[in-house]
Amino acid sequence: AQSVTQLDSHVSVSEGTPVLLRCNYSSSYSPSLFWYVQHPNKGLQLLLKYTSAATLVKGINGFEAEFKKSETSFHLTKPSAHMSDAAEYFCVVSVSGSARQLTFGSGTQLTVLP
Amino acid sequence: EPEVTQTPSHQVTQMGQEVILRCVPISNHLYFYWYRQILGQKVEFLVSFYNNEISEKSEIFDDQFSVERPDGSNFTLKIRSTKLEDSAMYFCASSVIGGRSYNEQFFGPGTRLTVL
């Protein structure tokens, strides 16, 4: 069975400073990993995905994540936070061969301070 | 930009009543999904649906749940006899294809179900 652990339930940064949202995964098989973002009253939007190609994945809005198999991590980063980045972020895994079923982490609420 | 829509945004019901949550997936998508998130807990997979039948379901998706695509646009989740523990946010999603190659699942904004 696969799972993801988001290490921080809340992260607060100042506008213009770097963002780091941490995610560790567990999977018996070759995983596909994703980050989704949810703004208030909006659906979950895909930020980026890793599907066994390049380990450094670039997504929308300047976000990127690095797949590190040795550390079973898939942390999300952004060099400079913007006020519009304030949202909830979910790290998600799907197991190869069962791409229809996503397993979500518990979410990290990102607050961006002016 | 096409998006998944869900109605209602909030549904309040009495325990034991039947509820139907509605979703309109993106028009050229073929796979449809329901997920739920109980307050303070993780988003959980319920069921996936393709070609008018369930393709995968989780342990949560027991006999009180059913899904249907009653026409060419709607995808519904029915809960026959609601329980207090069914109170949650229910998300609908759709993707162009499913299977071994991942295709992005597009999510709706959710329906908050409150069972009293």
Image (cartoon, rainbow, N blue to C red):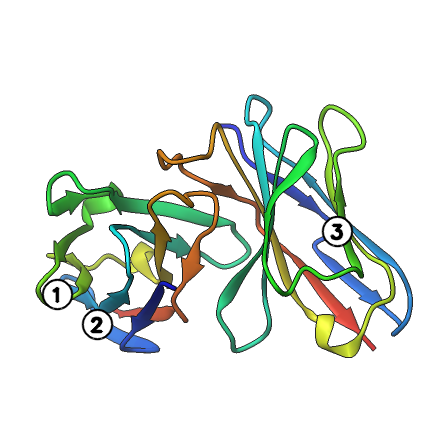
* Residue designated by label 1: A17
Q: Nearer the viewer, residue B31 or A48?
A: B31
Decide: marks 2, 1 in contact (CB < 8 A)? Answer: yes
* Residue designated by label 3: B8
Q: Residues within 10 Å of mark 2 (few under 14, many from 20)?
A: some
* Residue designated by label 2: A13
Image side of residue B17 versus residue B47, left or right: right
- Disc 2 secondary structure class: strand
Residue at left 38%, top 64%? A1
Question: Considering the image in quadrants, where does the C terminus of chain A appear?
Answer: bottom left
Whether residue A78 can be seen here: yes
How much space separates mark 2 and mark 1, taking CA atoms? 7 Å
**Residue B87 in picture, x, y percent from top left:** 71, 71
Q: Residues within 10 Å of mark 1 (few under 14, many from 20)?
A: some
Q: Nearer the viewer, residue A43 or A104?
A: A104
Whether residue A110 can be seen here: no
Q: Amino acid at mark 2?
A: Val
Image side of residue B41 versus residue A113, left or right: right
- Disc 1 secondary structure class: loop
Residue at left 27%, top 45%? A48
Residue at left 40%, top 34%? B103
Q: Nearer the viewer, residue A55 or A86?
A: A55
Residue at left 15%, top 38%? A53
Q: Residue furthest front?
A: A28
* Chain letter of the residue beneath label 3 in the structure image: B
**Residue B71 in picture, x, y percent from top left:** 79, 27
Q: Are marks 1 and 3 on the same chain?
A: no
* Chain letter of the residue beneath label 2 in the structure image: A
Mark 2, mark 3: which one is toward the viewer? Answer: 3
Mark 1, mark 3: which one is toward the viewer? Answer: 3
Image side of residue B53 versus residue B107, left or right: right
